[in-house]
Image (spheres, rainbow, N blue to C red):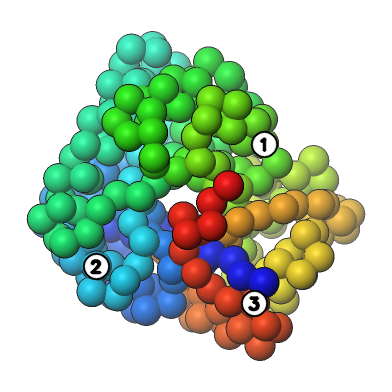
């Protein structure tokens, strides 16, 4: 049995430092690298890509609404033309930097509000799918496990990777607890690691109301900007390894 462990990296911006990319890259198997629209500056993104290449970590484009001020966490009603062009632009920018760093972009993972909105909104979802395919049909697309987007992406012929979140609370319907509500972000590394072993072994997580939610995931995300993120990711990896679950990049086994 195996599963991927990923994190959102490359999010520092100028003098503003976000997370510990070097330490996280020693733990994860895939890195979702910011493309400059919600976070990240060119020099910092390039440094993260070089570090990922040195570690042999798989790289993906962490595309977003154009929302630096809101860290990509504000919904935007973009036209289809603007959204498609925006996603194409971001992937292309990261591809150029990745080539200079000695690696390549293998997949796309939407960030923040875009990620959550296209999980259920078909129009914007199909815009993102079309943008990915316009760049490279071999790219994978990371989606919220069990979401409508997973089906739309598969039907369109994209390699689809379903994702669960280690450090986020779940609601009974399988959606994430909104960040402005209690229980949205989890902080106990031991409890988080235990629930990820449950996820990998049994295909379930316990929701915030105590119910058990069935989730089949190819990858587990630990947010790089969460307090104690590196320690949490390390504990998740340790507990998975102890349970006989290998960590490897999801694009090696994407379906």
Residue 102 relative to residue 2: left or right: left
Which disc number belongs to residue 147?
1
Q: Which residue, as the protein is rendered here, is positioned at the far bottom?
A: 242
Identify the mark nearer the N-term, 2 or 3: 2
Disc 2 crowd rating (10 Å Cα; few below 14, some 14-19, many 20+) is some
Q: Is residue 126 above or below residue 195?
A: above
* Mark 1 to mark 2 CA distance (whole Å): 31 Å
Quick check: 248 above or below 251? below
Q: Quadrant of residue 90?
A: top left
* Residue 67 position within the rendered picture, expressed as x and y whole percent measured from the top left: 32, 34
Q: Position of residue 123 (x, y in %)?
A: 53, 15
Residue at 16% in and 61% down: 102
Mark 3, mark 1: which one is toward the viewer?
3
First-in-chain label (1 vs 2): 2
Residue 68 appears left or right of 142: left
Question: Which quadrant, please, contains the N terminus?
Answer: bottom right
Mark 3 — residue?
Answer: 245
**In the rendered view, does 19 fall on the left or right side of 177?**
left
Please name whichever residue, 8 or 161, is drawn nearer the observer in this view of the structure: 161
Which residue does the numbered mark 2 point to in the structure image?
53
The answer to whether residue 6 is visible is no
The answer to which of 95 and 7 lies nearer the viewer is 95
Query: x, y (%) of residue 53?
Result: 24, 67
Residues packed near mark 1 inside 10 Å, few (<14), some (14 to 19) or many (20 plus): some
The Cα–Cα distance between marks 2 and 3, rounded to whole angstroms, is: 24 Å
């Amino acid at each position: 049995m195996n599963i991927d462990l990923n994190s959102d990296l490359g999010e520092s911006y100028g003098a503003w430092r976000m997370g510990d990319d070097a330490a996280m890259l020693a733990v994860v198997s895939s890195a979702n690298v910011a493309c400059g629209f919600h976070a990240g500056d060119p020099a910092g993104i390039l440094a993260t890509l070089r570090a990922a290449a040195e570690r042999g970590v798989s790289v993906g484009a962490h595309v977003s609404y154009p929302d630096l001020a809101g860290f990509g966490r504000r919904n935007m009603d973009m036209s289809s033309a603007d959204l498609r062009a925006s996603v194409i632009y971001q992937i292309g920018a990261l591809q150029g930097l990745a080539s200079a760093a000695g690696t390549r972009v293998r997949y796309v993972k939407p960030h923040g509000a875009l990620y959550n909105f296209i999980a259920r909104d078909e129009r914007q979802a199909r815009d993102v799918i079309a943008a990915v395919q316009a760049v490279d049909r071999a790219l994978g697309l990371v989606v919220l496990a069990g979401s409508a987007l997973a089906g739309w992406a598969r039907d369109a012929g994209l390699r689809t990777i379903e994702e669960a979140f280690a450090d986020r609370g779940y609601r009974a319907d399988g959606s994430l607890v909104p960040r402005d509500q209690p229980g949205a972000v989890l902080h106990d590394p031991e409890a988080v690691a235990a629930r990820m072993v449950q996820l990998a072994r049994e295909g379930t997580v316990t929701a915030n109301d105590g119910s058990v939610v069935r989730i089949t995931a190819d990858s587990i995300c630990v947010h790089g900007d969460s307090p104690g993120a590196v320690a949490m990711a390390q504990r998740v990896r340790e507990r998975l390894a102890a349970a006989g679950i290998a960590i490897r990049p999801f694009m090696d086994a994407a379906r």
